[in-house]
Amino acid sequence: MGLALHSDVGRAFSIIEAANEKHLIRQNRTVRISASATFAHSMLVSSIGRFADAHPNINVTVETEDRLVDLRSEPIDLAIRHGLGQYPGLVSEWLCSPELVLVASPALLKRHGHLNTCR
């Protein structure tokens, strides 16, 4: 009797699960982003609130890592990295040019002088 009941109930739960997949899960989606901690803090955090207001059915999660993630096997939808965008088998889009700033201690500058040219 238990096996027969399980068979009937199992089919019913399968139908419910399929309906859930079809109708409800599409309503709330998650986009998983991997980015360096610096980029996430300086660029993403300020934008996520506006994105959430404009797209309330899309959840955004951000993982902060510098390593290259494997977009084929890891649960990451997109990765933001510093580089030339040459990643075989992946689509890359240019976002922005980095702004580099040289910072030195006054003691170092006193010992070695000011930097006059880029090398």
Image: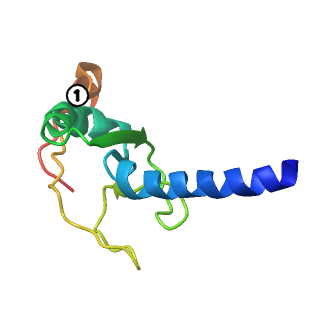
Q: Is residue 8 left or right of residue 119?
A: right
Residue 13: % across, % down: 61, 51
Q: Toward which corner of the image does residue 97 lie, by quadrant?
A: bottom left
Q: Is residue 119 above or below residue 65?
A: below
Q: Residue at x 40, y 79 (%)?
A: 88
Residue at 37% over, 40% down: 62
Query: Residue drawn 31% across and 56% down?
Result: 82
Counting from the top left corner in percent of width and height, residue 40 is at 30, 38
Of helix, strand and loop, which one carries label 1? helix
Instruction: Point out the residue furthest to the top here.
Output: 107
Q: Residue beneath label 1, please?
A: 109
Residue furthest toward the front?
1
Q: Position of residue 26 (x, y in %)?
A: 34, 53
**Residue flagged by tag 1: what amino acid is it?**
Leu
Based on the displayed image, in which of its 4 quarters is residue 39 positioned? top left
Q: Residues within 10 Å of mark 1 (few under 14, many from 20)?
A: few
Given residues 82 and 108, the one toward you in this image is 82
Quadrant for the C terminus in the image: bottom left
Give whichever of 72, 43 is nearer the camera. Answer: 72
Which residue is drawn at the image coordinates 17% and 40% (left, top)?
51
Q: Is residue 116 left or right of 1 when viewed as pictured?
A: left
In this orientation, which residue lies closer to the viewer: 10 or 31? 10
Task: In the displayed orientation, state which residue is furthest to the bottom.
Answer: 89
Q: Is residue 63 left or right of residue 114?
A: right
Total marks drawn? 1
> In this rendering, is residue 76 above or below 40?
below
- From the top left corner, tell me how far across and down residue 115 is, in percent: 16, 40
Based on the displayed image, in which of its 4 quarters is residue 86 positioned?
Answer: bottom left
Q: How is the image coloured?
A: rainbow
